[in-house]
Image (cartoon, rainbow, N blue to C red):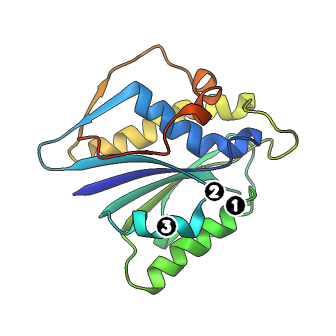
Amino acid sequence: MNILILGIGNILFQDEGIGAHFIHYLDEKYEFKSSENTVSIVDGGTLAQRLIPEIIKYEKVFIIDCIDANNSKPGDVYFFDFLNSPDEIDWQGSAHEVEMLQTLNMIKMNGDLPSTNVLGVIPKRVADDTTFELSEEIIKAVLTMEHTIINAIKDLHIEVEIKKDDITIEEISKISFKRDIIHGPRI
């Protein structure tokens, strides 16, 4: 099985960049091993529809992004199947989410949508100021996000090894802009 972990977000606008920062964090901290599966890690930035050719290459996709949801607070983490999105998810938490929603819906209309899960977090600050700095709520949410995605990857019979235990999301958020957009396949 070909698996894609796709981070979405604009790293210039605080919490808006968590999807991109988070996949760089995963790439720096973990190694994914399997004799049968591949794991690719991609920083999709705010490319939205330009990601369609990349997304349809995979059988399983995990989208990491900011979202919004009714009755939520900054730092709340949601993990759901895109085709069965909870009613409280309204996709209005950042500058790009409607585009990503439209992108996934376009792929679905063409019959090419792979099995897709969304790991979303409610941002505190979006576009208040141009900075790579993340809010405390998002920094704290990273632990839940990390456990969630690692467990989902392990459920797909992927061996997960820690290669660098002392890396933090704060460190990564300061260097994400220096890293390649696509890191794939990891196995």
Residue farthest toward the left in the current orientation of the protein: 35
Q: Report whether residue 66 is seen.
A: yes
Q: Amino acid at mark 1?
A: His
The disc at residue 46 is 2
Left or right: 114 in relation to 74: left
Residue under the image location 46 percent in, 77 percent down: 107
Instruction: Kindly state the secondary structure of the residue where label 1 is placed.
Output: loop
Q: Nearer the viewer, mark 3 or mark 1?
A: 1
Report which residue position mark 1 lands on.
96
* Tag 3: amino acid: Phe
Instruction: Tell me whether circle 2 and circle 3 mark residues in contact (CB < 8 Å).
Output: no
Mark 3, residue position: 82
Q: Which residue shows up at 50% across the image and 18% down it? A: 167
Q: Say if 177 sits above or below 112 in the image.
A: above
Q: Secondary structure at mark 3?
A: helix
Identify which amino acid the numbered label 2 is placed on.
Thr
Q: Position of residue 98 (x, y in %)?
A: 68, 68
